[in-house]
Amino acid sequence: GIQVEQSPPDLILQEGANSTLRCNFSDSVNNLQWFHQNPWGQLINLFYIPSGTKQNGRLSATTVATERYSLLYISSSQTTDSGVYFCAVELTSGSRLTFGEGTQLTVNP
Amino acid sequence: DTGVSQDPRHKITKRGQNVTFRCDPISEHNRLYWYRQTLGQGPEFLTYFQNEAQLEKSRLLSDRFSAERPKGSFSTLEIQRTEQGDSAMYLCASSHWTGTLAGPYEQYFGPGTRLTVT
């Protein structure tokens, strides 16, 4: 099956710093989503981004489908950004998502 | 528009007991997905439905697991004869399939049911 690798596995930042999270995938995909999992376990949708670049406030994401990777940028990080960030891909439209192992982000005040 | 809801949020059961979880998708969503997440891992796919039809089941869904979506709205996931290895967060998601490949078919997740088997 498809492999999804995220890096780094852990990231510790001071408030106000910028960061880049990476997601590599082993096959062509139809869909890619980024999620933030809060401390209570809720997965919060950040981006639906099979290709191209999107921005939402301090967050932006870029997917280069031909090179099989996606990047999530977090600027001016805040303590509330702490949590686990997951990348998930879909091979066939509307079917299962395959998740990476996640990046655990800790933002210290 | 309310999001995906799951009930119960927490369940503690003894090994060997049966448990059932419920998921209510976003109202206009016709696809419903179940995932399982263990500590420190990403969610893993279990099964999904389009309306009442179960379209795919993962090999993770052993004979002790059964999922239904009888009227194409809410879904239930039952685990029979629970084992300690079943302890996990069970996540439900939904999306709206329009019948074309174009999409987008963004999945939205519920808050999960955390199962602890003692």
Image: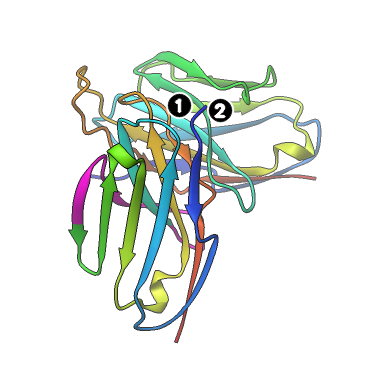
Magenta stretch containing residue A50, yes or no?
Answer: yes
Question: Residue flagged by tag 2: what amino acid is it?
Answer: Leu
Residue shown at 54% from the left, 49% from the top: A101
SS at badge 2: strand
- Image disc number at residue B75: 1
Extent of the magenta region: A37-54
Image quarter hosting the N terminus of chain B? top left
Crowding near the residue tagged with mark 2, few <14, some 14–19, many ≥20 C-alpha atoms within 10 Å: some
Q: Could you say where residue A43 lies in the image, as x and y percent from the top left?
A: 42, 51
Q: Could you say where residue A19 lies in the image, as x and y percent from the top left?
A: 37, 70
Question: Residue flagged by tag 1: what amino acid is it?
Answer: Ser
Examine the rendered structure and indicate whether residue B50 appears above or below residue B32: above
Q: Could you say where residue B65 lies in the image, as x and y percent from the top left?
A: 64, 23
- Image disc number at residue B77: 2
Residue shown at 27% from the left, 55% from the top: A61
As rendered, which of B50 and A27 lies closer to the eye? A27
**Are the residues at dot 1 and dot 2 in contact (C-beta closer than 8 Å)?**
yes
Examine the rendered structure and indicate whether residue A5 appears above or below residue B46: below
SS at badge 1: strand
